[in-house]
Image (spheres, grey):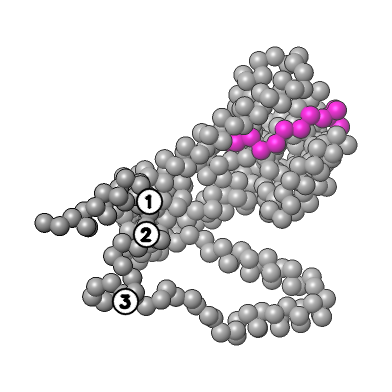
Amino acid sequence: MPLLSIVDITSFNTTFYSSFVFIKGEEKLDYLWALNHFACLFHDVPKSKVVVMDRELALINAFKIIFPNSINLLCNKIVYSITENKFEEKWNTLHFLYTNKPHVITYLKDTWLPLKEKFVTAWTNLYLHLGTTVTSRIEDAHSTLKAYLQVSTEDLYYIHTTISLAVTNQKKEIDAMVASERIHVPLFALNNPLYSNIRGKVSTFALKKINEQCQKTNCAITEKPLPPCTGSFSKTMGLPCAHTISLLENDQALILDNALQSLLQNLQKRYQEWLKSQQETAQVTLDNMINTLLIVLQNPREVFTRGHPSGTSHCSLANSTRRNPSGFELVEHKGQQCTLY
Ligand SMILES: [Zn+2]
């Protein structure tokens, strides 16, 4: 029985297991069933925008139905063309080189060319894929799982227990990484004002990627200027590129993306789809929210007085965290108070 494993990426650029599904076969209907159950796990959590997968047509077709708004990239081992023109150029060269082997050209034309937007860099660099354009991390995750399972002939209970163990261990590793990254900041980011807003909030992996862009900016000042911005670094990594950094003032800090920005973009998109009456209701609600006076609760003013407030004793037992005195301590205390010298 095939086991479909779905993995995701942490902010440290490591892989974690997201879901496992045993499927009856590898037909479109099997993938539809599996992906449908996977989609149910999201509830109101935004679904993954970009998914990388092998060229399995049944899976690709099922994916398009269940995740119509997501992009699926195919394992990018074939063509690295940065622009569409470069791709055309390379394709024409290939055509020319294999003129005497028409079956190769026909195969590429029929099988791969219709899917070029899913694996050629010129198109894949338009999406936030965090540098993952090949399925090697899935293969790595799969081999780790195989090492846990050891044999493929055990029963479902054994497999469930073993997979649970693998996932638990992975969760522990991620927790340890989160704790470690909160404490350890890379040296280059420690006293640099550029990182003052994001230090301890983004992963070392992301900080290093930004640092690489900073190095490019610095080199551009001392050596040759930066090449024109293609925008692909920011689009694929979700981080500022060397060009953006070069535009910052001295001592200006980077800021985290404003979460409100994406909310507003979503709202704007949905607003266009609503009926007139729904749009009017939304306008009234938003107007009310903007114009309602903001009541901010503050801590009471602290008043410093001399001595204890009247009516309170120095040792208020009611609020004290000290233990109650034992019987013999009460007797001794009373005895001390009554002793006459
Ligand atoms: Zn740029």
Which mark's residue is nearer the viewer, 3 or 1?
1
The image quadrant of residue 76 is top right
Question: What amino acid is found at the position of numbered circle 3 in the picture?
Answer: Ser
Question: Ligand 1: does it lie within 8 Å of the C-beta at label 3?
Answer: no
* Secondary structure type for disc 3: loop
Circle 1: element type: loop
Q: CA distance from mark 1 to mark 2?
A: 8 Å
- The x, y position of residue 141, in whole percent, is 62, 29
Q: Are marks 1 and 2 in contact (CB under 8 Å)?
A: yes
**Quarter of the image that includes the N terminus:** top right
Distance from label 2 to label 3 (Cα)? 16 Å
Residue that mark 3 sits on:
310
Q: Magenta part of the protein: which range?
A: 15-28
Identify the mark nearer the N-term, 3 or 1: 3
In the rendered structure, which amino acid carries the disc numbered 2?
Answer: Leu
Label 1: few (<14), some or many (≥20) within 10 Å?
A: few
Q: Between residues 107 and 27, which one lies in front from this camera angle?
A: 27
- The structure residue drawn at horizontal position 79% and vertical position 70%, both measured from the top left corner, is 273
In this figure, which residue is indicated by the disc labeled 2? 317
The C terminus lies in quadrant:
bottom left
Instruction: Provide the secondary structure element on which disc 2 rests.
Output: loop
Identify the disc placed on residue 324. Answer: 1
Residue 226 in the image: above or below residue 267: above
* Residue drawn at the location 75% of the way across and 37% of the way down: 112
